């Protein structure tokens, strides 16, 4: 029998208790995923050299595009599965599960072939040099060889959460992280495989985690499990899956394009070391952003339920508490960047030039980081109250509307410092937009519950 999910009175129980109960699994999973990425950077930085870190930074757009295709199918299928299970249509939910595996396999194979064929030209376009491209190539060749495994693993993990097994999905993620952290130093230092060792460790960790998921889906006791015939593509199913997964797919693609522009800007104005510095800073910042996303994921069902129940005062209170939690996380990141950057950066590299550039860049990059919490929480909030237009607009403001123009203008006047400064400039601008939109929305809620009690 599947796990039983405790039904909560989402419109009655204390908000702090609800938020932390819903957010905790998401925070654990996302923090674990961040540690997965941080482990590679730390061990590569300590076990190879500064150019290897720069090479690893250049692979981020390819990794993000791969994740975009994964979310296209994974998010779409998991949403469809949730809807069908809510309608008690287990048969269609299982077909969605099987079709998602097939689609992920097909897309994963095609992406691997195309990326491997054009790997070097793509890396040079991303900002690689003769010094960094060998490291980026070595890493991506292994990662791309396991790309199908990655797609299926992440897709099945999303589907596992959607079918009522969030703890088991979390266990699979934590297992992958633990194995990667164990194998990274063994392969990099012990076997002397360098950056290839980090890539092999990543793929092997995902294979083991995938094994946990396959064990679940091959058991007849599971609510959804593999059956004969569910892997055959059914008419209309790809369209249903892709239409739902299109929004996160586009967001990941946009994120990849922005990282390409950033890497090219750093390479143009600061060279390979600047690219490497951004690679370290980006992974460090992502760690805190993932924790903030965890609070957002905890907020989402609570806001959606109470909004549907017209409990607008509770909706506002949930938003404010989530914002406070995310703000505290962003303040912690700010304090580390401004007062303890040398200690933090020393975990990733012992190269004095790379360390100095990373410290300088990190301080600029996170100069107004506490402001980031508002647009992040507000975007998810609007999505939760069924206002996707505002949610997408807010998601795009920082990366497209403000960041890209800043990257095209500021470096022309301030060089590599201008590239770093583009981030806090766009953060400030997106904060102002989010503040205006959320103030208007909360005012509407306040009028309603003052009139209706």
Image: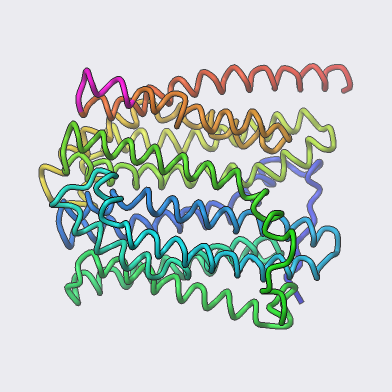
Query: Left or right of 15: which side holds 178?
Result: left
User: What is the count of numbered marks?
Assistant: 0
User: Splitting the image into 4 quarters, where does residue 404 fall?
Assistant: top left
Name the side, left or right, on which 66 lies relative to 310: left
How far across and down, in percent of the image, does residue 334 sit?
36, 33
Q: Residue furthest right?
A: 452
- Residue 312, given in percent of the width and then of the height, sits at 78, 29
Residue at 24 percent of width and 43 percent of height:
127
The answer to whether 344 is drawn above or below residue 187 in the figure is above
Residue drawn at point x = 34 percent, y = 41 percent: 260
Q: Position of residue 355 (x, y in %)?
A: 17, 43
Quadrant location of residue 412? top left
- The residue that appears at 57% across and 46% down in the rendered structure is 248
Q: Indicate whether residue 168 is drawn in magenta.
A: no
Q: Position of residue 208 (x, y in %)?
A: 46, 76
**Which residues fall within the magenta stretch?**
407-415
Colour mapping used in the image: rainbow
- In the image, is 52 to the left or to the right of 307? left
């Amino acid at each position: 029998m599947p796990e039983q999910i405790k039904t909560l009175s989402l419109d009655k129980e204390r908000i702090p208790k609800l938020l932390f109960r819903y957010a905790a699994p998401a925070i654990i999973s996302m923090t674990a995923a961040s540690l997965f990425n941080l482990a590679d950077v730390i061990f590569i930085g300590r076990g190879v050299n500064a150019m290897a870190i720069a090479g690893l930074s250049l692979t981020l757009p390819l990794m993000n595009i791969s994740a975009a295709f994964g979310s296209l199918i994974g998010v779409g299928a998991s949403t469809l599965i949730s809807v069908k299970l809510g309608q008690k249509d287990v048969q269609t939910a299982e077909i969605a599960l099987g079709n998602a595996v097939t689609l992920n396999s097909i897309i994963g194979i095609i992406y691997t072939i195309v990326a491997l064929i054009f790997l070097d030209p793509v890396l040079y376009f991303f900002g690689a040099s003769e010094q960094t491209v060998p490291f980026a190539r070595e890493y991506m060749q292994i990662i791309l060889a396991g790309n199908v495994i990655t797609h299926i693993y992440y897709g099945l993990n999303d589907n596992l959460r959607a079918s009522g097994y969030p703890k088991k999905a979390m266990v699979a993620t934590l297992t992958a992280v633990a194995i990667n952290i164990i194998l990274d130093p063994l392969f990099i230092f012990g076997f002397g495989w360098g950056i290839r060792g980090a890539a092999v460790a990543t793929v092997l960790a995902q294979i083991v985690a995938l094994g946990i998921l396959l064990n679940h889906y091959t058991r007849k006791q599971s609510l959804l499990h593999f059956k004969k015939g569910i892997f055959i593509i059914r008419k209309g199913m790809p369209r249903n899956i892709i239409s739902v997964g299109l929004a996160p797919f586009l967001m990941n693609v946009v994120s990849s394009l922005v990282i390409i522009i950033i890497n090219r800007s750093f390479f143009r104005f600061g060279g390979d070391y600047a690219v490497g510095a951004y690679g370290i800073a980006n992974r460090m910042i992502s760690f805190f952003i993932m924790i903030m996303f965890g609070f957002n994921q905890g907020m989402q069902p609570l806001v959606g339920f109470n909004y549907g129940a017209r409990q607008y005062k509770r909706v506002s209170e949930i938003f404010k508490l989530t914002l406070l939690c995310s703000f505290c996380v962003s303040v912690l990141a700010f304090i580390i960047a401004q007062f303890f950057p040398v200690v933090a950066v020393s975990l990733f590299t012992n190269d004095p030039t790379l360390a100095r550039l990373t410290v300088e860049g990190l301080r600029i990059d996170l100069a107004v980081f506490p402001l980031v919490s508002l647009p992040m929480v507000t975007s998810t909030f609007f999505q939760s109250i069924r206002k996707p237009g505002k949610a997408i607009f807010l998601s795009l403001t920082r990366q497209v509307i403000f960041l890209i123009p800043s990257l095209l203008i500021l470096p022309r006047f301030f060089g590599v410092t201008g590239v770093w400064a583009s981030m806090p400039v766009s953060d400030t601008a997106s904060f102002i937009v989010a503040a205006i939109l959320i103030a208007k929305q909360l005012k509407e809620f306040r009028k309603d519950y003052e009139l209706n009690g």
